[in-house]
Image (spheres, rainbow, N blue to C red):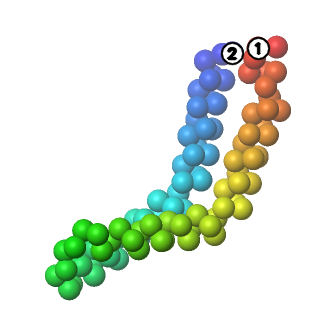
């Protein structure tokens, strides 16, 4: 197993991880900004007020993107298994 192959595997793994996590992270970012603006406008600085909408938002985005995320992860795993002999050095 060459250094380039290991670096490529690591790069692909990080790429898939970021691609799968991006919708949920984006939802948390948008919800956090909206809730922060609403709290600033209304002068309500309750910490627990922002927690529930973020959890619900992430859950909804997760449920909506679950089929796509599974497709990406299964495709990546199938690609890894298809090239297993090359990774083992055989």
Q: Residue at x 76, y 46 (%)?
A: 75
Q: Which residue is located at x 28 percent, y 81 percent?
A: 38
Q: Earlier in the sequence, mark 2 or mark 1?
A: 2
Could you tell me which quadrant the C terminus lies in?
A: top right
Which numbered tag is attached to residue 67?
A: none
Q: Quadrant of the N terminus?
A: top right
- Looking at the image, can residue 27 be seen? no
At horizontal 51% and vertical 61% (from top left) the residue drawn is 24
Residue 86 picture location, percent across and down: 79, 21
Other residues around mark 1 within 10 Å, as few (<14) / some (14–19) / many (≥20): few
Q: Secondary structure at mark 2?
A: loop
The residue that appears at 30% across and 74% down in the rendered structure is: 49
The answer to whether the residues at label 2 and label 1 have Cβ atoms under 8 Å apart is: yes
The image shows residue 84, relative to residue 80, as above or below, that is above
Residue 37 horizontal/vertical position (percent): 27, 78
Residue 81 picture location, percent across and down: 79, 32
| Secondary element type, mark 1 | loop
Label 2 Cα neighbours within 10 Å, binned few <14 / some 14-19 / many ≥20:
few
The answer to whether one can see residue 2 in this image is yes
Q: Position of residue 61 (x, y in %)?
A: 56, 68
Task: Using the image, tell me which numbered label, if any, was put on residue 89.
Answer: 1
Query: To which quarter of the image does residue 65 belong?
Result: bottom right
Q: CA distance from mark 2 to mark 1?
A: 6 Å
Report the residue marked by disc 2.
Answer: 1
Instruction: Name the residue nearer the viewer: 24 or 89.
Output: 24
């Amino acid at each position: 197993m060459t250094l380039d192959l290991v670096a490529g595997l690591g790069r692909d793994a990080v790429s898939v991880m970021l691609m799968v996590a991006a919708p949920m992270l984006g939802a948390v970012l948008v919800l956090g900004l909206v809730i922060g603006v609403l709290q600033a406008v209304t002068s309500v600085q309750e910490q627990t007020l922002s927690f529930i909408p973020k959890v619900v938002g992430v859950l909804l985005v997760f449920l909506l993107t679950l089929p796509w995320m599974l497709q990406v992860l299964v495709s990546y795993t199938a690609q890894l298994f298809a090239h297993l002999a090359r990774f083992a050095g055989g």
